[in-house]
Amino acid sequence: MIILAHRGNLSGISGTRENTPELLRQAFERGFGIETDIRRTATGELYISHDRAVDLTPELSEQMAADHAAIWRRFPRQAVALNVKETGYEALLVEFLEQHDLLQQVFLFDFELIEESPGTTAREIRSLHPAVRLAARTSDRHAESIEQALAIECAEIVWLDEFDSLWARKTDIARLKQAGKTIYAISPEIHGFAIERAERRWQEFAEWGVDGLCTDWPIQAEELLGRQPQSA
């Protein structure tokens, strides 16, 4: 099972270091993939941050995006899950991935949380480029059913999220796999579950054939599950 370091975290939440180039580089160097966030400034430049920044100049934001992309390219076999935080700049996202040679390494996800009609953004991006890798969400919130995820046919990946309950079952994973989907799952501690429960869930996910795990504790997950190839 591929392990993604959530915002670059290695052994729990890293506070202000989250999503920084240095922390993401450390995660790559440890052999993990990463999950991180991409945003757009009011003047149209991309930058990497979970929260909206209010003091970025165009030059600084462009440099930030370029610096991150350069680090990712140094580890081309390790997956990058890129959480898209706004809609309306799909062409710019595709241009960014092409410009920095990231089409095979990165996949984009979480459109359903920010769009009115599920699948609209994914289909728009697919129309712009046939090789961009996309994920559809399924969770226990926002009516994000497995049926809805499977209906977004252009998404070859499913991002499985468990907010309020550990709802997914082995049969759900089997159904998604039978549909030909790659499955990445959010680890329970990200939504406030105890780390002990998260560890049990990691083992269940591995046994059920989940392809990837996104966690704030990748080193601990690696120790529990054993080293696996981290290719995208």
Image: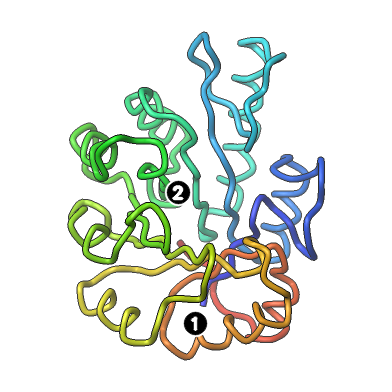
Residue 106 image label: 2
Query: Residue placed at 62% from the left, 86% from the top?
Result: 200
Q: Which residue is mark 1?
A: 205
**Decide: marks 1, 2 in contact (CB < 8 A)?**
no
Amino acid type for the residue under numbered disc 1: Phe
Q: Position of residue 84 (x, y in %)?
A: 46, 38
Q: Residue visible at 49% across and 70% down?
A: 212
Label 1: few (<14), some (14–19) or many (≥20) C-alpha neighbours in 10 Å: many
Which one is in front, 90 or 143? 143
Residue at screen point 71% across, 50% down: 25
Measured Cα–Cα span from mark 1 to mark 2: 22 Å
Residue 178 locus on image (x, y percent): 22, 79
Q: Nearer the viewer, residue 7 or 2?
A: 7
Q: Identify whether 221 is placed above or below 64.
A: below
Rendered location of residue 190, percent (x, y): 64, 61
Q: Badge 2: how crowded within 10 Å, few (<14), some, or many (20+)? A: many
Residue 197 occupies which quadrant of the picture?
bottom right
Residue type highlighted by circle 2:
Val
Judge left or right: residue 8 versus residue 160.
Answer: right
First in sequence, mark 1 or 2: give its number.
Answer: 2
Helix, strand or loop at mark 2: strand
In the rendered view, would you say 150 is above or below 1?
above
Residue furthest to the bottom in view is 207
User: Where is the C terminus found, in terms of image quarters?
Assistant: bottom left
Total marks in image: 2
Q: Nearer the viewer, mark 1 or mark 2?
A: 1
Percent across and percent down for residue 141 are: 42, 57
User: Which element type, helix, strand or loop, lies under badge 1?
Assistant: helix
Q: Out of 155 and 193, give the one closest to the viewer.
A: 193
Name the image colouring.
Answer: rainbow
Q: Quadrant of residue 122?
A: top left
